[in-house]
Every structure is written in structure tokens, then in C-alpha cells.
Image: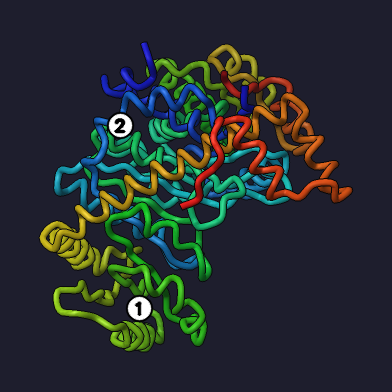
Amino acid sequence: MTERTLRILVGKPGLDGHDRGAKVVARAFRDAGFEVIYTGLHQTPEQIASSAIQEDVDAVGLSILSGAHNSLLPRVCQLLKEKGADDIIVFGGGVIPEDDIPGLKGAGVSEVFTPGTSTEDIVKWVRENVAPRA
Amino acid sequence: MSLASRILDGELRAAARLMRNLDDGFRSAVDDMKELYSHTGRAFILGITGPPGAGKSTLVDQLTAAYREQGKRVGVVAIDPTSPFTGGAILGDRIRMNRHADDPGVFIRSLATRGHMGGLSRSTADVVNVMDAMGMEVVIIETVGVGQDEIDIVRLAHTTVVVSVPGLGDDIQAIKAGVLEIGDVFVVNKADRDGADRTARELAAMLEMKKTVPGDWLPKVMMTEASRNRGIAELVDEIALHRSWLADSGTLERIRQERSVRHFEELLRERLFAEVFGHIRVNGRYREIVEAMASRRTDPYSAVDAVISERLGTPCQES
């Protein structure tokens, strides 16, 4: 059987305009040998869920610095579930208070990376937790 | 139920999955493509090519919007380069097309070149066929940002649009050989910038030097500002004119024939090689041959003759 190349969507839902972190992570994923579908700033959860399905990604990594993580991240998980695509792993990063993380995980977010996490750690987490779907 | 039948039932995830199987070279994809083939051949295939940063993605976004207004379903295949060092890629063409992401009449797929030269990925033609079978009436292919020689697109698209921008100065001379010969429509994008008129004039002058016979299609140079939606309606009209010319002049029929020939020959070449090579690699003959060649006990020509007649039972008749 041929090996699959891991595909990950990296995007910025919501209204904050700071995409430096997302770009750094996208670049780290590229250097790890993944195919990164980078969708950029100001995405609605609907756009992210549709893009994830069209691109057949294994995971979606979302960066949020606006404080709207508690509504945006669960909404993406919910939309994927509605479209029969909750096998796509969702993880997030950005300025997210520790207290919010258990609630996000309860809503279907697999992991949350807070400021200061190294790109090596994020790549390592992806390698250990995201398998290209057979 | 096969992926192909699920695609014909309108299931998006099945289509996305088959595209990935094609990209990853899964054998099972061949069976799905067999099933889909009779449902292809209906889409109009539009190629958009040009140097990096010319505004191709923005142009594709505007063209998609224009075709959606005409009520057509649109597929987009956007290709970006794979890193030669890590095998990874950043596929960023969707950034300009996000407004179409949740439109059920649009399906966008990003592909990485995965080492393939020529401006497309190895899987592009098949991915276009999947979109065709999904009922996309227009499929737009955006090539990797090209230099001079990436002209695979001309073998796949019905109409090829070559996008350039002012400010490349004398570099316009550099793209005149390969890319200038494949355009059916030329676009000078970012037409609000200094030098746009000059770029258009230079392009037009070069196109005039082409030898033509009566009845030939004469490519025009259009001006656009894709980011402000200027010149897009005119471009859509010009593309439609070319499409009518293809049909009326009999060129479309000829293209169909040529493509069928090429598709068949390519597949045959690939399969024959896999068949013969796979066999000798497994049974150890390959290693023997390489060693015998290295020590000059045999020559590659005789070795190939021998392998082919062993496998196919007949000496190879070169025509």
C-alpha cells in the first residue's frame, strides 16, 4: 500500500488580524513534510468546515487570538459532525486561558496550544495524534 | 458501495477522498476512474497560467464568481509547489477564493506538485475528470507560478489564459518562447500600475509576429484589475468566444482525439513498465542485469531485449 501524505488545514477563524503565529505553524508543518492548506484570515466556521472536506484533510489547526475561541472552535467541530466528517481532528492555538481548555476539549477539540508552545512540540503532537486516514 | 458510485450520488466526501487516492497513487483509484469515465467529457476546462504573483488566484476567484452568476457549477484545481527538501507544501491559493468555500456550487481542491515538473501535478488530469463527473460545468485549473517551460496546461485545458503583469520589464522577452506560444487569451493584470499599456503593447506586438493562416484563432491581450473586478466581464466574453471557435472550427474534436491518444499511450507506457520492471525486480533479474552492465559483461540494449521477450513472449517490434 502506498504511503499517504498528511494533509492539514491551517486557518484563522474570526476577526483578529494576526496571522503570524498561523504562518509560523504552517511553515513548521511544511518543513515536517506535511501538505498544509493555508486558508488565511477571517474565516467563518462554515468556510473552514467546507474547505476541510473538499481538501480531504486529516486535521484542522486553528489559531485564534481574538478571545472568541469558546464559540468558534466548538462551532467548527459541530459543523464537521453535521457533515459526517468528525473523523477530522480539530486542534487550536492562540491566546486561550487554561480555564477554557477543558470546555473546548469537551466540545470536540483534541488539543489546545497556548502561547509559548514550540513548533517542535506542535509537530510532535501531530505526528503522535494525527494519522493519515486509510 | 464504491467511491465512484457515491460521487455520482453527489457525495462530496467521496469525491475528496478519490482525489486524494489519485494523488497518493492508490491502485483502487483506477477502478473508480473506470466507473467514472463515461460520465466525463462534459466540462469546459479553463487553464490559468503565468508567473508567481501575477494575480492568478484572484483572477480565478473573480472568474468563479462570474460563472456562478451564469448559474454554472464550478470546480477549481489550484496547484502549488512541493518543497524539494521536505516533501511538504504550503497550498495557499484558497486564501483568495474563500468566499466560495461554502457555496455548494463550487468545489475547490488544492494540489501539491509532488516533484512533478510542467506546472501541474501528476494527478491533475484525473482530478479534473472527477470534477467533470461530479457535474461541474466549468473546471478552472490554476497552475503553479510558471517560468518559461511549464506548459503541461495546454495539453489539459480547452482554453489557456496566460496572465502577466506590468513591471517585469525586459523579462517579458524571457517568457516569449514557451508560455507565449500556449495562450489563447492573454491578460495583463494589475492594469492600474505604471507600464501596463506598454506590457500589453509588447505582448500584442509579439503575438502579431506569429504566422497565421485564415481561420486561425488570433489571441487578444486583455487588461484586468482582478482585485477590483475590472475587465473580468470582458475576459469571460473572450473566453466564451474562444470556446465557440473551438467547436465551430472542428478544433475541439481534434483536441478530443489527441487527448484520447495521449491518455491511452501514457497509461500503456506506465503499465507496461510497471509490469515488466516489477517482475524482474522481484525475481532478482534486475540486480543481475545491473551488475552485468557495470562490469560490461552485457549491454543495456540486449538486456532490455531479453527482458521484454521473456515477459511478453515476443521480440519487440519497433515501428
Residue B133, percent across and down?
Answer: 28, 32
In which quadrant will I find the N terminus of chain A?
Answer: top right
Q: Chain of mark 2?
A: B
Q: Is residue B269 above or below residue A3?
A: below
Which of pointers 2 and 1 indicates the residue nearer the eye?
Answer: 2
Q: Residue furthest right?
A: B295
**Toward which corner of the image does residue B188 lie, by quadrant?**
bottom left
Mark 2 nearby-residue class (10 Å; few <14, some 14–19, many ≥20): some
- Total marks placed: 2
Counting residues from the start of the chain, the first of labels 2 and 1 encountered is 2
**Between marks 2 and 1, how big is the CA–CA gap?**
44 Å
Amino acid type, residue under disc 1 in the picture: Asp
**Toward which corner of the image does residue A128 lie, by quadrant?**
top right
Q: Residue at image x 49%, y 86%?
A: B169
Numbered badge on residue B315? none
Element type at marker 2? helix
Element type at marker 1? loop
- Residue where numbered disc 2 is placed: B37
